[in-house]
Each structure stands twice: as structure tokens, then as C-alpha cells.
């Protein structure tokens, strides 16, 4: 393998491939980046078995004098290319090593001897379906925050993706909260998909404004292609809980409030909150946010609302979860559907058909807020 390429053409593709590599993998060759120079240009692949990122540099941006394959330690090769001058780099395989040369600088990296054992992705034999990249990225942001963060979260560490009547639906929960996001889409899924939250964030990082993405699905994995990059992701095993039946249909009050003043008040109350517990009380055209702790610290703040329909009420909530839900809701105004003191607390941007953010109430003693 021997080719010449500008450092600025190699680095972006190399960075994307290296992002999928897990340095803790017990198989040494899989801690590397697979580099293949062929008639189409340069192919770079990084993999952790669960997720693989494959990128390409087209032949018009590289001068290849000899085809070949190398697998180089991901961390080392990325660091080397980052620190090389912004100029043409010559990359040449010398058998057991690969040499990088630019100007008067020369450096060699070990070439993994078992590179033929590198686990390359299996392409999905399907034309796939097109997705608006910006809409997909927004759906990831508005849902993935609610996945279970524990290492053994099972399917709850993932986002469930489904389609229904020209809508794409993302759903995530950690049993304390639920995020459900819906967007109009022509995507038709043959079955529900559960994809790890971290892997969806990785796909989101590949997207730029205006990008169109091609989506393909197989029985055990899916792929997302953006321009010259494809992410191959293994689907999660295990059953995702049925969640639609936990969303209350009843409504005791509807409150419309400006999102930023509410989010700021919750952030301040969180400072003095014991175990992040706050009181959310509403009535007479305002919301009261209150917190306290065992040291005697207290916070009390009142916020004027845009409107209230229904009776007054109160509920204990987790301040951290409420802050994250408000951020994910990402709307100038927030519509709160109050369904009862001991029932789920529901936020939306005013249109629940586009999605909701649901919080379970916190359990407190009857006289806790007196």
C-alpha cells in the first residue's frame, strides 16, 4: 500500500472511523483502524462489534500508487495525523509497519499482523429509505436524554424506534421518566427497533445541517449513511416495555408558561433541594417552586404564567429530571398537563402529537412541605 494525501483530506475521515473503536476490546486487531487503498480511493473502518463506522475518501482526493491493507492502532494513528503539518502526507506499507512521511518528518507505526481477521461490516442488501438528517438529529436529542444510564440497563439503555401511519416515533425511558417524540415521515419499519442511546448520539454527530441520510434495516442491525460515511449498528436484544398505557388520558389542569423563567427557577431551587426534590405548586395565575434540605437551606420562587385552565394543584418532582425535560422540549413556551398529585407530570411544546416528556412524581411525606 502506498498513497499520497493531504493531511486535511485524511483527518476528518480517520477521526470518524476512530470514534467507533473501543480501546478496551480484548481482540488487539479490533483496537485499530482498518485502512484500505483500492481503485475507488481510501476506505477507513473502525469497529467495536456493536457499532462500526466506515468512511471513504474518493479517488480524486488521493494519489494511490499501490493498493493494499493496513490496520493501525486507532489512538496512535489519529494522534499522529492530527499533529502532522497541513501538507501532503505519503503513507507507505513496509510489511510489518506503515511509514508516514511529510517533508523532512518520517514516522513508522506497527501494522497489525492479523489484519485479515478485522471484523468488517456486512452491507445490507437494500436500497434503503431517505431520512431528513436535521429532523432525525432533533428526534435523537429530544429522546435520548431519557434512556437508562446504568451499565446493565438492558433495552432501557436504548431508544425504541417505530413507525405508525406516516409518523416516525422515538421512545425512551429509565422508569422515572419517559420521552416520546413523533415526526411526519415516509419511513416504514417492518418491526420495532431498539438502538443504544450512545450509538444514536454517534450517528447524530455525523450529521450536519441540511444533510440527507439513507437508512437500511436488517434482522439484527441497521445502517445510517451520510455522504461518504456509514454507521453500522447492532440492534439491542431484550424486550422494550409497552409504555403507551402509562400516559394518562385525564387532565386536571393545563398550564402554559415561558420555558426559560421556569427552567431558571428550577435550577436555582435545585441548589437547596434535598435529593433533588422540589415542590411545583400552581394557582391564581402563577407557579411556585420550592425546595429545602436538612441543613435548613430553603428556596421559594414565584413565576407568572401565560395561562392556567383548571383547578390549582401541587406535585413533588425531581429537579434534575425536570431541567433535562425542559431542555429537551426546546420550546419558547411549555405546556404542562397536570394529571394529579400522584400521577405523571407531562410537558410538551403545546402539541402532544409531536411528543411529550413525562415525569413520575417524587414520593414525600404528607407534611413535608409544611
Image: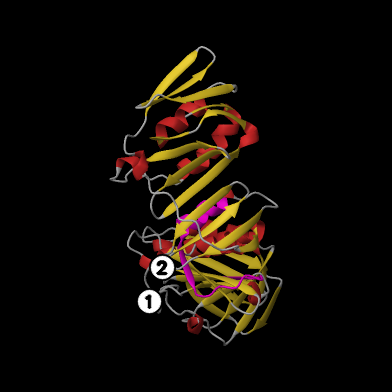
Residue interval drawn in magenta: 181-205
Quadrant of the rendered image containing residue 165: bottom right
Secondary structure under tag 1 reads: loop
The quadrant in which residue 362 appears is bottom left
- Disc 2 crowd, CA 10 A, few/some/many (<14, 14-19, 20+): many
Q: Is residue 52 above or below residue 318?
A: above
What residue does disc 2 label?
156
Q: Residue at x 56, y 53 (%)?
A: 204
- The reply to whether discs 2 and 1 touch (Cβ–Cβ < 8 Å) is no
Is residue 300 shown to the viewer in this render?
A: no
| Residue 111 location (% of width, % of height) | 36, 31
| Most foreground residue, 27 or 66 | 66
Tell me: residue 106, above or below residue 176: above
In percent of width and height, residue 88 lies at 59, 22
Q: CA distance from mark 2 to mark 1?
A: 30 Å
The residue depicted at 45 percent of the width and 68 percent of the height is 219
Amino acid at each position: 500500500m502506498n498513497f499520497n494525501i493531504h493531511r486535511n483530506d485524511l483527518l476528518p475521515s480517520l477521526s470518524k472511523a476512530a470514534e467507533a473503536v473501543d480501546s478496551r476490546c480484548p481482540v488487539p486487531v479490533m483496537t485499530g483502524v482498518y485502512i484500505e487503498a483500492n481503485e475507488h480511493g481510501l476506505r477507513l473502518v473502525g469497529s467495536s462489534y456493536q457499532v462500526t463506522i466506515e468512511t471513504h475518501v474518493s479517488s480524486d482526493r488521493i494519489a494511490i500508487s499501490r493498493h493494499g491493507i493496513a490496520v493501525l492502532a486507532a489512538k496512535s494513528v489519529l494522534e499522529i495525523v492530527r499533529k502532522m503539518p497541513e501538507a501532503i502526507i505519503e503513507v507507505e506499507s513496509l510489511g510489518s509497519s506503515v511509514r508516514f512521511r511529510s517533508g523532512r518528518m518520517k514516522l513508522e507505526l506497527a501494522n497489525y499482523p492479523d489484519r485479515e481477521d478485522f471484523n468488517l461490516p456486512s452491507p445490507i442488501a437494500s436500497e434503503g429509505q431517505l431520512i431528513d438528517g436535521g429532523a432525525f438529529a432533533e428526534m435523537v436529542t429530544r429522546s435520548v436524554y431519557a434512556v437508562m444510564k446504568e451499565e446493565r440497563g438492558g433495552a432501557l439503555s436504548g431508544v425504541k424506534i417505530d413507525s405508525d401511519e406516516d409518523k416516525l416515533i422515538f421512545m425512551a425511558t429509565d422508569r422515572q421518566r419517559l420521552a416520546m417524540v413523533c415526526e411526519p415521515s415516509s419511513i416504514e419499519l417492518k418491526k420495532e427497533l431498539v438502538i443504544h442511546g450512545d450509538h444514536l448520539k454517534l450517528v447524530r454527530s455525523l450529521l450536519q445541517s441540511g444533510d440527507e441520510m439513507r437508512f437500511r434495516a436488517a434482522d439484527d442491525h441497521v445502517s445510517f449513511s451520510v455522504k461518504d460515511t456509514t454507521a453500522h449498528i447492532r440492534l439491542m436484544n431484550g424486550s422494550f416495555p409497552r409504555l403507551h398505557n402509562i400516559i394518562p388520558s385525564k387532565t386536571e389542569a393545563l398550564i402554559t408558561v415561558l420555558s426559560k423563567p421556569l427552567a431558571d427557577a428550577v435550577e436555582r431551587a435545585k441548589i437547596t433541594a434535598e435529593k433533588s426534590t422540589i415542590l411545583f405548586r400552581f394557582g391564581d395565575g402563577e407557579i411556585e417552586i420550592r425546595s429545602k434540605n436538612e441543613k435548613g437551606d430553603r428556596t421559594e420562587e414565584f413565576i407568572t404564567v401565560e395561562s392556567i385552565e383548571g383547578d390549582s394543584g401541587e406535585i413533588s418532582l425531581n429537579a434534575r429530571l425536570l431541567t433535562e425535560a425542559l431542555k429537551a422540549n426546546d420550546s419558547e413556551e411549555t405546556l404542562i398537563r397536570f394529571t394529579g398529585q400522584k400521577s405523571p407530570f407531562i410537558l410538551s411544546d403545546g402539541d402532544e402529537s409531536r411528543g411529550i416528556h413525562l415525569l413520575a412524581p417524587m414520593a414525600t411525606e404528607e407534611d413535608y412541605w409544611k
